[in-house]
Amino acid sequence: MTLPTDPLWPRAGAWPAIADAEWDETGPTGSAARPTVAILGVPAFRTSLSPTGAHATPRAVRDALRRFSPTVLGPPPVDLGEALRVADAGDIDEPDGPAGEASVRAAVAALRERADLVIALGGDNSITYAVGQGAGAAGLITIDAHFDLRDGVSNGSPVRRLVEDGLDPRRIVQLGIADFANSAAYARRAADLGITVVTLDELRRRGADDVAAQALEIAGADGGAVHLDVDVDVCDRSVAPGCPASVPGGLAAWELRALVRAVAADPRVHSADIAEVDATADAPDGRTVRLAALCVLELLAAKAVTR
């Protein structure tokens, strides 16, 4: 489908390749400089517990971004293209497996030297492990229906793997953990590790701002860098049919978007991933991929509006 052209209505997603980005040589340290953001595709899918075409999602999200304006209404209105310097670093080739994860870590670490925020487009949720490590995260906030504490190596294990590799579980906060989507054994594992869990019901009762403030206080203790994992299967299946594990009764699209912006507004959040969307299994209107694209824009808005 050809999208209409209007010189007074710019489209999101028209970001230069990282090699062509006009970023100050001083990087993100200059206080007067616009914040810098790098987009990186991490199309992992080979260890997913459910059959998935998540490797097709980074490209689909980039295409979906073109359907949206880069303007946050405010007031006053803010054009993200003017408020931020955003560049696209392309995709990691074959990010699964030990060699692939090493490539992800190296790419994210290199981008963090130049960018205030690195956004990884998944791919399944296994990407949280290597992206969080590459970003040097000292704390982790997940927006997810699941604990991701399973044994083995899969999209169900990144949180456990991060803890085993040294991430302090007392600096992990999991938002949106849902009934009937987890086992008692993994709930006990989270409790034994000292992970802070905010269930889906509690999240709804308290609201995004209150929950985000608590999560940031815990994960960002002592000013350490925080990684945000946005697993779109936390949403209701009506708005996220392209997530294999989404169920009826999850978050509404607006609730996820509000929570993403509330968390990412904190300057300690230096990296984020958007995961678990299978573009090949989406509804004909592409609603799941479009929601993932809007989460990208919410991450950008958080850095632009609150600076």
Image (spheres, rainbow, N blue to C red):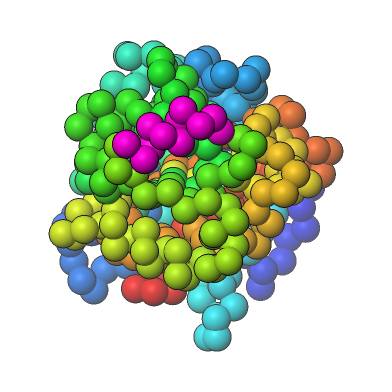
Q: Is residue 22 visible?
A: no
- Decide which of 116, 127 is in the foreground and name it: 127
- Decide which of 90, 155 is in the foreground and name it: 155
The picture places residue 67, in percent across and down from the top left corner, at 69, 54
The picture places residue 83, in percent across and down from the top left corner, at 42, 70
The picture places residue 210, in percent across and down from the top left corner, at 45, 70
Reply yes or no: does residue 114 show up in magenta.
no
In the image as oriented, which residue stretches furthest toward the right? 284
The picture places residue 245, in percent across and down from the top left corner, at 65, 32
Quadrant of residue 29 within the rendered picture: bottom left
Looking at the image, which residue is at 58% across and 70% down?
A: 71
Q: Provide the major secondary structure of the magenta segment.
A: helix
The quadrant in which the C terminus is found is bottom left
Looking at the image, which residue is at 32% across and 36% down?
A: 192
Horizontally, residue 92 falls left or right of residue 122, namely left
Reply yes or no: does residue 186 show up in magenta.
yes
Looking at the image, which residue is at 67% across and 30% down?
A: 244
Region in magenta: 182-192
